[in-house]
Image (tube, rainbow, N blue to C red):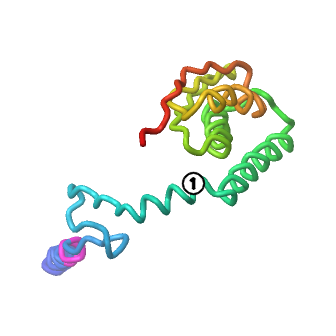
Amino acid sequence: MQKLTPFLISTLLLFGVAACDNASKTSESAPNNPNEAPQTPTVKTTEASQKDAESEVRRRQLNSDIRAGEQRNNVTGGDTKRAKGTLASEVRSKLEANIPKGQLTVNATDDGTITVGGTVNNQKELAKIETLAKQIKGVKIVVVKAIVNPPKS
């Protein structure tokens, strides 16, 4: 028995090393080396992603997600004091749905203050930020630090 135990342990270790030798990939296109830089998307892929982000279907999905979040909040008592991560996420979705070409960042605090930074294409979009953000339950103050930066032709 004393000679069998080290043999079994060494066999188990040997199988473990052999099993760990072949790293799995999540997809065919995943790089062999995890330190390898990801491939740059093609122009076609980028344009398709941009169209999807601006589509009416995407806008409806985002607004539906926001409504679902509000309904969940109402079920739990309609608490207006919400987690800052939830608040920032809902405001970000609302802005993305209604200002699709804007490049905005959203930060929230525990007291319901939302800070929006980044760029929008025109003054009209800039003016919509505060109104849209205040439509989310729990938002008390909106600080707009975004600027107008029209797209270059």
Residue at 35% x, 61% y: name it.
Answer: 41
- State the image quarter where residue 125 is shown: top right
Residue at 78% x, 33% y: name it.
Answer: 135
Picture layout, residue 83 above or below residue 62? above
Along the horizontal axis of the image, is 84 left or right of 146? right
- Where residue 126 sits: x, y (%)? 62, 28
Q: How many numbered discs sit on the rendered protein? A: 1
Residue 3 colored magenta? no
- Structural crowding at the residue carrying mark 1, measured as other residues with C-alpha within 10 Å and reported as few (<14), some (14–19) or many (≥20): some
Along the horizontal axis of the image, is 106 left or right of 65? left
Q: Amino acid at mark 1?
A: Ala
Picture layout, residue 85 above or below residue 11? above
Q: Nearest the camera: 123 or 144?
A: 123
Along the horizontal axis of the image, is 44 left or right of 129? left
Residue that extends furthest to the front in the rendered view of this protein: 153
**Overall secondary structure of the magenta stretch?**
helix
Quarter of the image with the C terminus is top left
Picture layout, residue 143 above or below residue 80? above
Write down the region rendered in magenta.
15-20
Quarter of the image with the N terminus is bottom left
Q: Which residue is mark 1?
A: 53
Residue 19 colored magenta? yes
- Where residue 118 sits: x, y (%)? 50, 29
- SS type, badge 1: helix
- Where residue 12 sits: x, y (%)? 22, 76
Q: Nearest the camera: 98 or 77?
A: 98
Along the horizontal axis of the image, is 132 left or right of 26? right
Picture layout, residue 71 above or below residue 91? below
